[in-house]
Amino acid sequence: MRDTRKLEFPRTGPALVILAGSALLSVILLFTTIDPFLDKGGFLAGGLDVHIYRDGAFRIVHHIPLYTEPTMRGLLYTYTPFSTIAFVPIYLVPWGAVTNTWLVFNLCVLIANVLVSWRLLGYRINARLALISVLLATTCVFIEPVRQTLYFGQINLVLMLLVLLDASREDGGKLRGLGVGISAGIKLTPIYFVAYFVALRQWRSAITACVTFLGSVLFAGIILPVDSREYWTATFFQSNRIAVDNHPANQSIRGFIAHVLGGPAPMWLWLLIAGSIAIASLIVTTALYQRGERLLSITIAGLTACAVSPFSWGHHWVWFVPLLVFLVHKAQDRRRWWVAAAILFTATAAWTYHWSASWVSIGVFLLPPWWPITKVMINGYVIAYLAVLIGAWIHLRRDGWSIGERTAERSIRFPLLRRRTPETPSCPTPCP
């Protein structure tokens, strides 16, 4: 039989006090660091991206070219043709209600992401854990990736939920890989998880993801033949439609290189460094998965997808949310993990700098360029990612892991409830 024991979150104790305090602090910071109704910055004055999604759906419904004409505020549509089909339900929402409707929806999705993360850790989903999830999700609204996703009306939280739901399914399950394929069909970056499945030798999941993604391309090609041809033969190769490599908000390895060099990142150098880091990440995430650390494994894979992407805005890094869940989980046994959680929150929070009464920059990588540590801050998320990857490797080494090690424990539902010791030997799944 599989190990079906489930963890319970403490009814009382410092964890509840800390989470309640951090949730309150986040809400206070969210509404006091910037006027919530400030144009182009206030938390309640956003919705640009969700209106672009709606405009994309509007165009395909009314047979208007998707990629050759600018959309809201002169911006170009950059997502796949399939994404506009997925966004048709948004088009059904009245224009004036889109922003607030999507904001509420995204907040619900944020809570769902936290709940699925707990499930991956082996916790019993009950009313108490739901309350804990609301508190933790509220804490997360002030970290920059989430704050900006909510402000712009981005779809990052939805895509992450689809991937986490895949990760929560049984190995070899018929639907495992479906969420990755749909996510990649909307926004290409999640295609990285196919490599993750391959590294885990989960061939069925990898095939399901690939078939689903290719199905989305084919379906869009049938429904939108002209836009599909334009996207896959021209738009797909125009990376400058997003922004230049060395844009301060490009939180990727390619952006890191461009920031250091002060100009475009050489393709060969980016491929060399990003490829090497991706391989290292796959080795670490595979080892974590084999030891039952399913949440940490998929989280690092998600962070890696952001890191190796040619261009990653700050709001793409919503994978810091399940990482924060993991740190809170670890803090239940060893309180020093609260320090790690506090550091992560501080490093990724939506700290602001007011350039003027009506213009602010948000996130540590956009703080004043004349500050002495700007060269570090401008690459903040990549540095945080590398620290997490190295920390996971150290965690594995302390657990007796070494590169090339083989393990029979390839598929378990939940992580072990205590560290392996000679007194608690491991056994292949299923255990007797």
Image: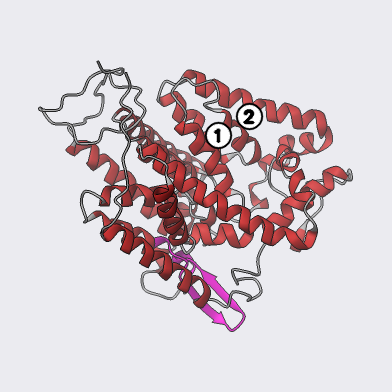
Residue 367 in sight in this render: no
Name above or below for residue 236 compared with residue 361: above
State the separation of the CA atoms marked 2 and 1. Answer: 8 Å
Which residue is disc 1 drawn over? 191
What amino acid type should be assigned to the residue bearing mark 2? Phe
Report the front residue among 388 and 29: 29
**Who comes first in sequence, dot 2 or dot 1?**
1
On residue 13, the disc is none
Left or right of residue 32: residue 20: left
Q: Does the magenta segment cover residue 353?
A: yes
Local crowd at mark 1 within 10 Å, few (<14), some, or many (≥20)?
many
Helix, strand or loop status at disc 2: helix
* CB atoms of marks 2 and 1 within 8 Å: yes
What amino acid type should be assigned to the residue bearing mark 1? Ile
Local crowd at mark 2 within 10 Å, few (<14), some, or many (≥20)?
many
Task: Give the magenta range.
Answer: 347-367
